[in-house]
Image (tube, rainbow, N blue to C red):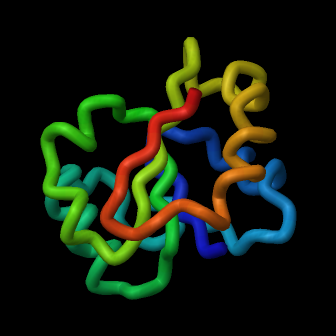
Amino acid sequence: MRILLDECMDALLRRELPGHEVDTVAHAGWASTKNGKLLRKIADSGRFDVFLTMDKNLPSQQHIQSLPFAVVVFRAPSNKIADVRPLLPEFLRRVARFEAGHAYVLP
């Protein structure tokens, strides 16, 4: 899967997702882009299957249904690797089943 990490995600998380092509919003050149515009850029790029964020409001504020990728929201105490790591087994178990145009909240 081609996964894009939102700016709020620690870039070190890339190492925690073996077997997947993982990039960051900053590396893609979209740093500081607001949510709606960012989602359009991701969609227009056609480069990603999953957008991983900690922005719990994103699914209710944006039109996810029309997106050509899935949005996954991690609900953790913070964006530190130590807080996010416990969610990774569930994410990795389910990632192949995430569908474009849907938002998923873990846990």
Residue 55 falls left or right of residue 4: left
Residue located 76% across and 51% down the image: 93
Residue 51, image x and y in percent? 46, 58
- Quarter of the image with the C terminus is top right
Residue 9, image x and y in percent? 55, 40
Residue located 36% across and 34% down the image: 55
Residue 83, image x and y in percent? 69, 20
Q: How many marks?
A: 0
Residue 61 falls left or right of residue 51: left
Q: Nearer the viewer, residue 21 or 31?
A: 21
Residue located 37% across and 49% down the image: 103
Residue 2 falls left or right of residue 12: left
Q: Is residue 68 above or below residue 78?
A: below
Q: Is residue 47 above or below residue 58?
A: below
Q: Is residue 7 above or below residue 37?
A: above
Residue 43, image x and y in percent? 30, 77
Residue located 34% across and 30% down the image: 56
Q: Nearer the viewer, residue 9 or 101?
A: 101
